[in-house]
Amino acid sequence: MADEKDDKHESAKLAYNVFLDRLMAYVSQYLCKLLASVPLSEIRLVFAGGIGEHSPKLRADVLGKLGWLGVQIAENNDTATGTVREISKGALKAYVVETDEEGWCAQLAREQFGF
């Protein structure tokens, strides 16, 4: 039984690492495009939605991989509260923004279909 649990743990780690790699590829491409025409001090990275709001590890891992830009994760990454909160230090600013995805979907449906 322990081997099965270890296999699941290894599979979960692999899935997380693949997700992080794909996310970094996406973020890096956009940062390169932006940095061609916008100063770093004007760029904002926003974490929102379920995983963006509720995974301090993911936020720390993403910002850690952007260390070459001088960004550092703030101490409040795990504990900050509020609708919008800054979680970085350095020229590149990063924020966690609370969202209500289901509420917005319901609102758009009401508007579109006249509910």
Image: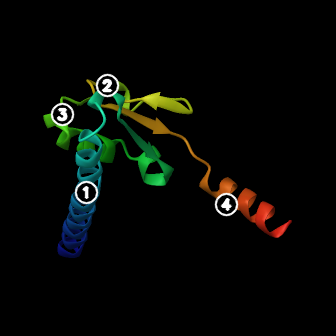
Sequence-earlier tag: 1 or 3: 1
The residues tagged by marks 4 and 1 sit, at their Cα atoms, a distance apart of 27 Å
User: Image height check: is 48 above or below 7?
Assistant: above
Q: What amino acid type is highlighted by mark number 1?
A: Leu
Residue 113 falls in image quadrant: bottom right
- Give x and y (percent) for residue 39: 28, 30
Q: Nearer the viewer, mark 4 or mark 2?
A: 4
Callout 4–callout 2 Cβ contact below 8 Å: no
As drawn, the residue found furthest toward the left would be 68
What residue lies at 67% left-to-right and 54% top-to-bottom? 104
Report, in whole angstroms, how far the alpha carbon at label 4 lies from the one at label 2: 33 Å
Q: Which residue reaches farthest right? A: 115
What SS does tag 2 mark?
Answer: helix
User: Which quadrant is the C terminus positioned in?
Assistant: bottom right
Query: Mark 2 sits on what residue?
Result: 75
The residue that label 1 is drawn on is: 20
For label 3, the residue is 69
SS type, badge 3 = helix
Residue found farthest to the front: 37
Contact flag, marks 3 and 2 (Cβ < 8 Å): no
> How far separated are the C-alphas under marks 1 and 2?
21 Å
Q: Are marks 1 and 2 in contact (CB under 8 Å)?
A: no
CB under 8 Å between discs 1 and 3: no
Identify the image quadrant of residue 36. Answer: top left
Where does the image place residue 79, in percent across and percent down from the top left? 42, 30
Q: Amino acid at mark 3?
A: Leu
- The quarter in which the N terminus is drawn is bottom left
Decide which of tag 3 and tag 2 comes sooner along the chain: 3
